[in-house]
Amino acid sequence: MDPDADEDTVSDLVAGALDGDSASWDRLVERFTPLVLSIVRRNRLQDAEAQDVVQTVWLRLVEHLGAIREPRALPGWIATTTRNECHHVTGGHRPVPSADLDARGRPDDAAPAPDRALLEGERHEALLAALAELPERQRELLLLLIEDPPLPYEEIGRRLGMPIGSIGPTRARAIARIRSHRAVQALLEV
């Protein structure tokens, strides 16, 4: 048995939420909120608009949860719905902050090319989708490993109740799962 197996797969959580289990719904929201927030932040929405988008995404999921044929595709559905809601709120355009304009009113030449920014955004979304589907123990470990300033392994082991010798192998399994995730694989095929 895999010591890092997640007791709550996305399919289980969707089934539980459809059966009216509020704990399953709460776990879905907890797991995928970082994905929603990353897309909202990338669209540079103001606080009130951002909150509206987040609430609308979860409302849309409640409305369409029963129509989702493949629960493993839920991260992609959530990402697409969030992008669509951001687009709806902004009216199809994103405000350009004045700091991004030079004296002549043109976008700053140092700004990344639109295709590069788009690719970076897609990579970020794929990573968040893969991270959301990791077993909780692996997800928590990776999040602790990227803390700034870095945490010593002793502290990570203490927080997770994990022997220090298990941190490396657990990290390796988590990274392997992220690399094999369909959203990450799809980006590698491009």
Image (cartoon, rainbow, N blue to C red):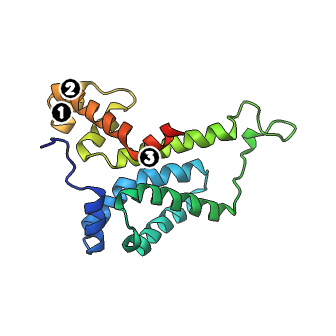
First along the sequence among labels 3 and 1: 1
- Quarter location, residue 31: bottom left
Which quadrant would the N terminus be assigned to in this image?
top left
Badge 2 crowding class, 10 Å Cα cut-off, few under 14, some 14 to 19, many 20 or more, is few
Q: Could you tell whether 74 is left or right of 119 in the image?
A: left
Q: Secondary structure at mark 2?
A: helix
Q: Is residue 177 above or below residue 75?
A: above
Q: Residue at x 61, y 51 (%)?
A: 43
- Quarter location, residue 68: bottom left
In space, the residues marked 2 and 3 are separated at their CA atoms by 33 Å
Q: Secondary structure at mark 3?
A: helix
Residue 62 in percent (x, y) is at 40, 72
Q: Which mark is residue 154?
A: 2
Q: Nearer the viewer, residue 49 or 64?
A: 64
Q: Amino acid at mark 1?
A: Arg
Q: Nearer the viewer, residue 30 or 69?
A: 69
Q: Are marks 1 and 2 in contact (CB under 8 Å)?
A: yes
Q: Nearer the viewer, mark 2 or mark 3?
A: 3
Task: Give the residue number, with chain letter if any, for mark 1.
Answer: 158
Badge 1 crowding class, 10 Å Cα cut-off, few under 14, some 14 to 19, many 20 or more, is few
Q: Amino acid at mark 2?
A: Glu
Q: Is residue 65 above or below residue 71?
A: below
First along the sequence among labels 2 and 3: 2
